[in-house]
Structure formats: structure tokens, C-alpha cells
């Protein structure tokens, strides 16, 4: 099992980024795919039309989102922290307990698909 710890810069307020991460309609806009999402602890979610499935475990509006992602019978914890800075927000990502065989795909997915799409949304 492996972990990822990365930072991303977005030209948006913490409120706007939090909304993009937690509002089902916004998730569908920046992913371009169907999503199921509620801002309720212990609610099940899916993104990219079921490619990512998990459970929301903690919300702190405009500051924090914690989830558990499911890989077959393995649970992997994702923590996204939002830190305001002079030019918008710095996003701190921690993804723990990633199966070795999924690591490369997940690491690229965070950069290209997940945060790549958010950068395109906010930094244009």
C-alpha cells in the first residue's frame, strides 16, 4: 500500500472550491460525468459515472473534506484541506492506503483528471 501527499494551487476562494468538491451539480460540470453526492457524513458517493465510489466521512465547510474510497475490498482514505492564500487557495491532498497496483493510475488521475479539471475550471 502507498500514500500520496500533494499540493495544488487554484485561483478561487475556499468557498468556491469547497462548493465544486461537494455540490453534485458542480461535480458533474467539472468532471463531465454523472455523480451521486450529498454533504452528509456517512453518505455513499460516486463520481465519473461510478469509476470512483466511496463514503463521505467528514465535512468542514470551506476547509475540509474526508472520504473513504473503495478498491474492491480495500478502503483508502482521502483528505482534502483548503488553505486560503494570497492568490486563491492551496489545496492539500492526502490519499492513504492506495493498493500498489492502482497507485500509478490514481496519482495520474489526481493530477490530470481531478485537479486538472479543477485548475481548468478556476484558472482560466
Image: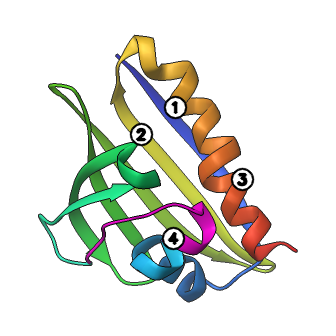
Residue 81 image point, x, y percent: 47, 63
Looking at the rendering, the stretch of residues picked out in magenta corresponds to 28-38
Q: Which residue is the site of mark 2?
A: 95
Residue lying at 34% horizontally and 16% vertically, measured from the top left: 1
Percent across and percent down for residue 71 are 27, 29
Quarter of the view holding residue 29 = bottom right
Identify whether 32 is placed above or below 26. above
Q: Please report the residue visible at 59 percent of the width from the left and 43 percent of the height from the top.
A: 110
Spatial CA distance of label 2 from label 4 is: 22 Å
Q: Which of the 4 quarters of the picture holds residue 101?
A: top left
Pointers 1 and 3 in contact (C-beta within 8 Å): no
Q: Residue placed at 44% from the left, 20% from the top?
A: 102
Q: What crowding class fits label 2: few (fewer than 14 Cα within 10 Å), some (14-19), or many (20 or more)?
A: many
What's the CA distance linking mark 4 and mark 3?
15 Å
Q: Earlier in the sequence, mark 2 or mark 1?
A: 2
* Element type where label 4 sits in the image: helix
- Say which of 55 and 79 sits in front: 55
**Residue 77 placement (x, y as % from top left):** 29, 42
Alpha carbon distance from label 4 to label 1: 19 Å
Label 2's element? strand
- Label 4 near label 2: C-beta < 8 Å? no
Amino acid at each position: 500500500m502507498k500514500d500520496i501527499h500533494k499540493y495544488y494551487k487554484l485561483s478561487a476562494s475556499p468557498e468556491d472550491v469547497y462548493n465544486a468538491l461537494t455540490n453534485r451539480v458542480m461535480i458533474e460540470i467539472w468532471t463531465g460525468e454523472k455523480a451521486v453526492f450529498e454533504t452528509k457524513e456517512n453518505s455513499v458517493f460516486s463520481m465519473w459515472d461510478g469509476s470512483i465510489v466511496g463514503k463521505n466521512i467528514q465535512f468542514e465547510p470551506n476547509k475540509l473534506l474526508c472520504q473513504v474510497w473503495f478498491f474492491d475490498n480495500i478502503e483508502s482514505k482521502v483528505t482534502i484541506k483548503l488553505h486560503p492564500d494570497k492568490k486563491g487557495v492551496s489545496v492539500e491532498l492526502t490519499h492513504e492506503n492506495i493498493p500498489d497496483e492502482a497507485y500509478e493510475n490514481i496519482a495520474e488521475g489526481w493530477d490530470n483528471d481531478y485537479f486538472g479539471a479543477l485548475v481548468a475550471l478556476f484558472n482560466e
